[in-house]
Amino acid sequence: MTVIAIDGPSGSGKSTVAKAVAARLGLAYLDTGAMYRAAALWADQAGLLDQPEALPKLVQQMPLEISLDPADPTVRLAGRDVTGPIRTSRVSGIVSRLSTVVPARRVLVARQRAIVAANRRPGIVVEGRDITTVVAPEADVRLLITASEAARLRRRALDQRGQAGAEAIAATRDEVLRRDRDDSAVAQFLEPPPGVTVIDSSDLSVDQTVAAVLELVR
């Protein structure tokens, strides 16, 4: 089984590129960030988000279903489709309160590794944070997709607000940069470790970035 591991900061384009690469190669796709978002939503709804000692057990028992189909990466909690709700600004603002709790993070990493091991497609593209170092350090291809701060803020503003004017970028700045800062304390995704190839997507289109990844895979 081929494993492609992709790390990167918020707004670098790693999710869009990872889905496209998986679709082109007929591989499964695992969005680990969606798992953290779902866990944060679950903890928030349970009223336990500010009780870090309770989070590992909560995350372990979380009734999560995540699709590995790059064309339909649906996320369900207790049978309810939360694919949309986990992408709201509300969840973006609280996810680091769970993702920076190391014991809870370890539980999610174990679940992610189990998903990779159980995959029945010819391979899988796994993307998120600390994928190349913790989740899949033995992956066949290990990448860090990055971009300039300006490019990342512009992309996230377009994704979430449909525009990239000064006001939209200002509204997005704290959400993007704060989460990267918080998560960088517990995950490595800003600097490439040995053996990881860097792709700077600042001045590349999605198609160009996908082509660069496919060339490395080949």
Image (cartoon, grey):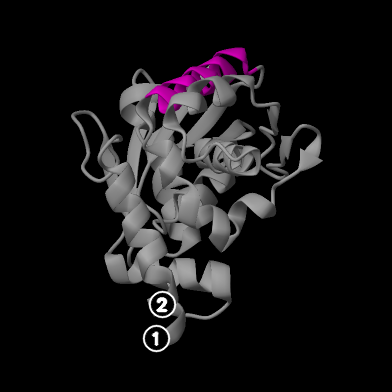
- The single residue placed furthest to the bottom in the displayed view is 166
The residue at the point 41 percent across, 45 percent down is 96
Residue 170: x, y in percent? 38, 78
What kind of secondary structure does the magenta stretch mostly adopt? Answer: helix
Query: Is 169 placed above or below 102 here?
Result: below
Query: Is 133 placed above or below 156 here?
Result: above
Q: Find out whether residue 95 is within the magenta segment.
A: no
Please name the residue that numbered disc 1 is placed on.
Answer: 166
The residue at the point 50 percent across, 55 percent down is 92
The Cα atoms of the two marked residues, 1 and 2, are separated by 5 Å
Name the amino acid, label 2: Ile
Horizontally, is 28 left or right of 171 in the view?
A: right
Please name the residue that numbered disc 2 is placed on.
Answer: 169
**Observer-nearest residue: 55 or 65?**
55
Q: Is residue 117 visible?
A: yes
Contact between marks 1 and 2 (CB within 8 A): the answer is yes
Span highlighted in magenta in the image: 103-119
The residue at the point 37 percent across, 52 percent down is 179
The residue at the point 66 percent across, 17 percent down is 120
**Observer-nearest residue: 211 or 69?**
69
